[in-house]
Amino acid sequence: MQNEEHSPADAIHVPEPIHEGSTSGVQLSANMTRRLEKLERWRIDPSLIKLPDGAPKFEGGYAIVSRALLVSPSDDTEGQLVESNVRTLMSSLRVSNADGNEDRQEMAGGEQEGKPKDEVPTEGEDQGSDGETSTRPKAVAVKKMKVKARGDGVRVLGLALREAEVLVKLSHPNIIRLEGFVEDVSREVVSLVFPWEDNGTLKDFVALHDWEIPERISLIFDVANGVEYLHSRTPPICHGDLKSINILVNSKCRAVITDFGSAHHPVAKDLNKERERASEEPESAPSLEATLCPSTNTITLTCKHYTVRWAAPELLEEEESSLASDIWALGWVAYEVMTNSIPFHDVKEAVVINLIVRGDLPTISNDVRMLLIQELCSVVGRCWTLDPSKRPAAKDCRESISWMPGIAPNPMRAGDAAGFMDRSAELLMKLGYMHRRQSDYPNASNYYNEALGVYTDLADSQGKANALEELAQIHRFQQEYSQAVKSYTEALKIYTDIGDRKGKGSALWGLAEVHRLRNEYSQAVAFYSECLQIRIDIADRQGRAEALWGLASVHRFRNEYSQAVAFYSECLQIRTDIGDRFGRAEALWGLAEVHRLRNEYSQAVAFYSECLQIRTDIGDRQGRAEALIGLADMHRVRNEYSQAVAFYSECLQIQTEIGGRQGRAEALWSLAEVHRLRKEYIQAMTSFSDALTIFTDLNHRYWRAFALRGIGDTHCDQDDRSSAVHYYEQAAKIFKELGNTPNEAVVLKRAADVRRLMEQKVAT
């Protein structure tokens, strides 16, 4: 809109004033007249639009976009007051809005799946305002369509009306709102009016600062959210020209999709209606002529332009744009936001088409930022699938991105001479979460500690408790249970002091988890029970379900399967009642585990499968990997090794793509076990060793001990008994340090059995 695919023309003189008038003197068809009548409430009196001297302007091939002021009729009668208001507002527009740091709720850890979708107004219904009640002039962008040939005004009007007809039916925070239109075909004036977004295009905005990854993800989420909204309309709407310069950033630093000149419904055409409109406007979805124009870097279609660098490969093969081609472009938008680079930025225009058709795309995983958010790399890679039918739906993209840490950019952040940025505590918490999701616990801990310092300096007790709780989780994940208890206890005290009962319940749950992991089941039950009572008292059904899940897990580990099933089932019912699909999948997984332990494999498979389906539907790839490994275990214990390998391999692929190092190591360990059982000892040793390396890097001693035991088993199976004893002893030592007596006993017995065989061999 402000900058369709154009370069700014700051020195261009203000265009001629917008004249009053109508289409008198120009004969419009009955159809065109009907369309104008339906949009009558969006018609703007030209006298209400003021174009101050020096206002920004952008010129492109089809329109000139100027910043202007839209005044109300009452203001327009006050002459001097209007001019004063105009000057004041134009000055204030140069000041950045400091309220652009609103956070977006993440869908993680059992939180809600997403925001409710906005309803679409019926045709002819006013979209309403954005909450403004002031009578001050409003900054707007006037998109004045170019009438390049004499008598071409009617055709240009048709194009503008088509865009307006799409927009008036849309209402969504990530879709541009139409303020109205101005038309006087007899004087060749056809303009669309939109809100002015002073942060400019997404392309320019991301280049403005060295944004942190969660800030960039927030913008990508906004775009995916907008695309999902378009694709979910009835019938669906294809944007047709999605790219960073057709996306604006509003005053709250949220991305807003604009420029709907190429938008259309990708459905079969009604030939009679197409013939009726042919004289007034171009076809809604013409065939593509794949001809490169080096001067504009575009490939030209009939009355449309698709920028070649964003074009999906099927567009180069004379197919029309579709929902799938929007998804291809969405992948490029994410790439641009993360890398600050346009597609094929280092490639000459004449080569681009061949690269697209061959699927020779940039290696996204080599980018420094993308490396830190592997799950986004996976989403972009799926968007760039050459076969359009295999690309993800917009809903899938949005759901996958919603699991990633995002926070609206804050333009007020400043850096010092050494390059250190002034990060908010909220941003630091998001950065900590980002690293925790990838099992990068040292960096996660650093960010959480930094956030803790900021909250402490601000005397923000709530924030301090939240940071302490996150640090406690990091200690828990690394089996540093004493430190975890210390941090949870400190957080618990703060929550108690400030009267935050929900926070208190959360800290109690964390303490219960630590005791459960230390096999201190009585203490775990006590903390889970206190947590459960608080959550019942405050009517926190989701928290109640979490406490029930914890109690069920304790009973499962105690082999008290009937009680475990009862608690998991109650948890499942609550999750179902409140519509928490993430939590429902967790409860199903727990029930599957109980049936597995009772050797009730058919029931276990049924629960694992339902869990897998939910996690696939909500875009929880981490959870999907957990369900896959459960199904793989079922095939392994039934000696169905081929199926087990297939599921373990899929799990391994997911964990690799999302950067889940611990999950990847667990999948490697499971694959190694299957290879060992199939006597494929080379593959088994390789997978066990790879898993051991990762567990050692993560300082995950529990799983490190299991990897050592697996290597010992592999040596034992090959009659390399001295090596087997060596690895068994290392594993036993770790289990002893962890207080895991049952596993220590198992490994020591295996070592003793091997020594006895060695002694018998010597004796003979």
Image (tube, rainbow, N blue to C red):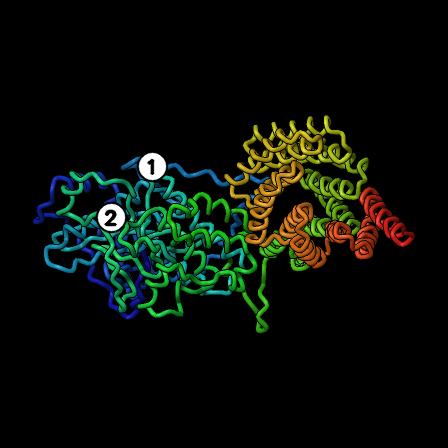
What residue is pinned by disc 2? 285
Image height of 498 relative to 475, above or below: above
Give the farthest residue toward the bottom.
Answer: 417
Q: Amino acid at mark 1?
A: Thr
Q: Which element is circle 2 on?
A: loop
Q: Does residue 563 appear in this view?
A: yes
Separation of disc 2 and disc 1 at Cα? 18 Å
Residue 108 appears in which quarter of the rendering?
top right
Quadrant that contains the N terminus: bottom left
Image height of 703 relative to 504, above or below: below
What residue is pinned by disc 1? 234
Image height of 747 relative to 360, above or below: above
Apparent side of residue 167 relative to residue 157 in the rendered image (left or right): right
Q: Does residue 71 appear in this view?
A: no
Nearer to me, 210 or 524:
524
Nearer to me, 308 or 696:
696
Could you say where residue 595 lies in the image, as x and y percent from the top left? 67, 31
Apparent side of residue 391 relative to residue 571 in the rendered image (left or right): left
Which residue: 19% across, 42% down?
A: 36
Q: Amino acid at mark 2?
A: Ala
Could you say where residue 586 lies in the image, as x and y percent from the top left? 62, 37
Sequence-earlier tag: 2 or 1: 1
Could you say where residue 339 lies in the image, as x and y percent from the top left? 47, 63
Residue 341 appears in which quarter of the rendering?
bottom left
Apparent side of residue 695 relative to residue 109 in the rendered image (left or right): right
Could you say where residue 24 lies in the image, as x and y percent from the top left? 10, 48
Q: Nearer the viewer, mark 2 or mark 1?
A: 2
Nearer to me, 565 or 181:
565
